[in-house]
Amino acid sequence: MPRTLWIESDGQLATWDQTRLPFESVVIPLGDEAACARAITTMQVRGAPLIGAVGAYGLALALRVRADDDALAAALQRIGGTRPTAVNLRWALERVRDRVRPLPPDERASAAWDEAARICDDDVACNERIGRHGRALLEALARRTGPINILTHCNAGRLATVDHGTALAPVYALHAAGVAVHVWVDETRPRNQGASLTAWELAERGVPHTVIADNAGGLLMRQGRVDVVLVGCDRVAMNGDVANKVGTYLKALAAWDNHIPFYVACPVSTIDPWARSGDAIPIEEREPREVTHVGGRAPDGTILAVQVVPDGSPALNPAFDITPARLVSALITEQGTCDASVPGLRRLIGSERAR
């Protein structure tokens, strides 16, 4: 299967428009900085690792236009402000910045493009390792429970990364190894990334799955129909608090109350050494229309959005929430698993990053 972000034969960056899935497969060109920023802001691309990769290429494209220090700083600010919660965007932009800043302006665009390509390659390798570590963890659970039922929230598959995914990487590894696995897919209101994207991915891979209403997870856990909750995330604070799609916190509470493991799969780049706790993580608020309207396919095949609230009713739309570290059983990273705690994270990333 192709990567989520690729270079066309004419040298132009391209990706799928995820706002059109699962009903239409539309490729969009990302030919300049504005196109990359727009794709991130409008969620044509989403998922912390993919946002970081697109942001890195966007910076490279900006430097093709102008590459002096002032232009570099301005582009970093513009792209960095598109999605504030996902720390991978800042991480990727800083990685490109650090690569090009020592260079003369006429060499910066090419070096930035090459660094963005390396970020993509590193993401693919990283997610493969997350898949291996997660598979080992879940295989041990499957040996005790038989066929394993996994509940996931939002989309942390290959569509959220350059390839493989984070939370879905262990699922794909289990399925490929012949382990009987079934995934409960939260619809993930208000944008329904679970129902539209995760379900699409799992169907594409032939992984058994069932889409459920967001509020059904607690009941399924109480009934003994969930063995493990496995999610991705957009940022991890140094105390182990986790920022992920809004609704994750409620799933973690239900898992805790029903003695079900709650695992978070993420690359080490998602750990923010500057955030002491979840209180330091900015929570993006998006347009109320995402709550007041629901998109879907009409009987005639038309893709449209319909209003589901009365005229004049206000809506609040926080895109993320914070799951406290005490509810997280473990983090699954490319370097292995670790406790969601200050000591666990310090051992994982090293004291030089754990400020």
Image (cartoon, rainbow, N blue to C red):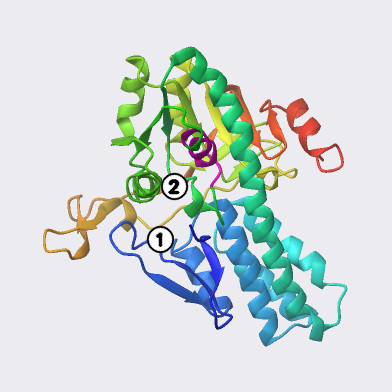
Q: Which residue is mark 1?
A: 18
- Disc 1 is placed on an element classified as loop
> Which amino acid does the dot numbered 2 rest on?
Pro
* Residue 20 in picture, x, y percent from top left: 33, 63
Left or right side of 300 for 336 = right
Task: Tell us which disc is closer to us: 2 or 1.
Answer: 1
Q: Is residue 84 visible?
A: no
Q: Residue at the spot x=32%, y=49% of the render?
A: 315
Choose between 183 and 305: the one closer to the eye: 183
Membership of 171 in magenta stretch:
yes
Q: Residue at the spot x=37%, y=49% of the render?
A: 204
Quarter-of-image position of residue 139 = top right
Residue extent of the magenta highlight:
165-175
Prevailing secondary structure of the magenta residues? helix
Q: Which residue is mark 2?
A: 318
Q: Residue at the spot x=25%, y=53% of the render?
A: 294
- Disc 2 is placed on an element classified as loop
* Residue 135 in picture, x, y percent from top left: 57, 31
Residue 278 vertical placement versus 82 (above, below) = above
* Residue 338 in picture, x, y percent from top left: 69, 28
Callout 2 crowding tier (Cα within 10 Å): few <14, some 14–19, many ≥20: some
Q: Is residue 254 visible?
A: yes
Left or right side of 152 for 272 = right
Residue 170 vertical placement versus 198 (above, below) = above
> Which amino acid does the dot numbered 1 rest on?
Gln
